[in-house]
Amino acid sequence: MTGAVTAAGQDSPDAALELRAEGVRKAYGATVALEHADIALKAGQVHALLGENGAGKSTLVRILTGAVTPDAGRMLLHGAPYTPHSITDARRDAVATAFQELSLVPNLSVAQNLLLPRLAPSGLGLISRKEVIAKGREILARHGLDRIDPSAEMARLPLSDRQRIEIARAIENAGRVLILDEPSASLAETDWLFAQIEKAKARGVAILYISHRLAEVRAICTVATVLRNGRSIATVDLDNASNDDIFEMMVGHRVEADRPSARRATLPGTPRIAMKDVAGSELKGVSFELNAGEVLGVAALEGQGQRELFRCLAGLERPERGEIRIDDMPASYHSPKQALKFGSGVSYLPEERKTEGILAGLSAATNVVLPFLPRIARAGLVSQKREVASAQVAAGAVEMNPRYLTFPIGDLSGGNQQKALMARTLASGAKTLLLFDPTRGVDVGTKESIYAAISAFAEEGGSVLFYSSELPEIVQLADRCLVLYGGRVFDSFSGGQINEQHLVAAMIGHHDTAEQEAAI
Ligand SMILES: Nc1ncnc2c1ncn2[C@@H]1O[C@H](COP(=O)(O)OP(=O)(O)OP(=O)(O)O)[C@@H](O)[C@H]1O
């Protein structure tokens, strides 16, 4: 492997070199987020930044983009010293970023958000609303997003479209360097994203691409820098590095091969969830059952009703029609908190951790134990020691490093926040879990632990309904899978029938006719 650990992308004087960072360090109090990071981005090249959760990727992004000042190291933009003190400084130098936790203003319109970087909020008053909308419409059209209404309030858009707006805005401002921090995290497919990246690449923009999805990285990037514990371990040519090589660089040791997926037999008895002909704004009549001991996957392209399905089951929305029964009782709860106490308990891992999931001011430990505080209280009180001890048990199931538990959860990396929420959902005591994209932003190694925890939960009689934007996750984990299309269950698969080919065909509304003919 050492042959592959070349100085790819870091060679001597090169006219195409856009942005270089050397020996960058950043500590937050006692936490050293970056120890010694080096990276060199070239014009017209898509460069991946890889590393486990907490490796320092987003911190490096924040430094390159002026949001955070490094403690040491230097940066050069096109050979000249580059010392941005704010995101606006970086944008002035044509370096722009689409952030992992989107940086859009929810109560402004799409058009206002698209123009914001070039027009301070106060300046928005100087041009007419009509002009703002017209300019917004132009930008949307340039990025193939004509279907989005420029006057719509940002908060009303689904997460996937908000992510697209964040990306389109970054591309508009990235004359030289474009940084994309987990840009596909909320997208069910990458066609649009990759087309935009190819266009930027053709313009000679240097692109930094961060993702935990290796297949995606291989499809769009040519080189990768691997960070481990805040250090750049290597920059490799992706053609010369296998996935195993990359995992080894990320975690520091060889990783075991994937476990084969275990299909479970469901337990007889009353279904935990029985949904009959449920319809609402996106759902057009969905019926299914989830049994004890079963892991049921939901596959769908964006906007096929999956969000409404989960929100109805979590008590956040009321269906317009149809019936939902939990443990054979009509689901009469109106919030995830009530759902947790209903029947044998329904616990919800939401789509948006920042707004629906974490309580930012509180420690990671408090966030983890929140649903079962009464269970661990003594005379109504919970000591910090007891809280951390209980949280440690829960965190162990998702391989979350216990040292993070005392941190305010908002200070954790995105992937570690997700692990904390997953730990909370698993440890809630509920027998039914509703998991919306459970491993979003979680690194490759930890994903396996989360799959193992979900499987173990089902083997002990728990029931899991999960939606995933990553098909391999459904193939590996689900005993049965529903494919939603146009708000309906278009097809369903079980056991060995669950493969990516079947799922992809059904997700675009095609039945696999060859298979069906063969079966006749
Ligand atoms: N504002 C902050 N205060 C304290 N610690 C922080 C802060 N921001 C980041 N850290 C810590 O710095 C380390 C690196 O975090 P960073 O977000 O850069 O990781 P990452 O590689 O982007 O992870 P992920 O893949 O989960 O997004 C983590 O240990 C994190 O807890």
Image (tube, rainbow, N blue to C red):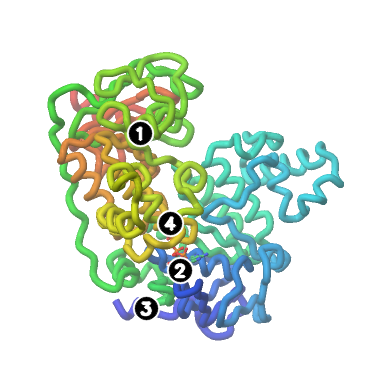
Closer to the chain start, of discs 1 and 2, is 2
Closer to the chain start, of discs 1 and 4, is 4
Crowding at dot 3, Cα within 10 Å, few <14 / some 14-19 / many 20+, comes out as some
Residue type, numbered disc 4: Ser
Residue 378 percent location from the top left of the image: 29, 48
Q: Assign a secondary structure to mark 1.
A: helix
CA–CA distance in space, label 1 to label 3: 39 Å
Kindly identify which residue carries mark 2.
56
Closer to the chain start, of discs 2 and 4, is 2
Kindly identify which residue carries mark 3.
5
Nearer the observer: mark 2 or 4; the answer is 4
Nearer the observer: mark 1 or 4; the answer is 4
State the mark number for residue 363: 4
Closer to the chain start, of discs 1 and 3, is 3
Kindly identify which residue carries mark 1.
505
Residue type, numbered disc 2: Gly
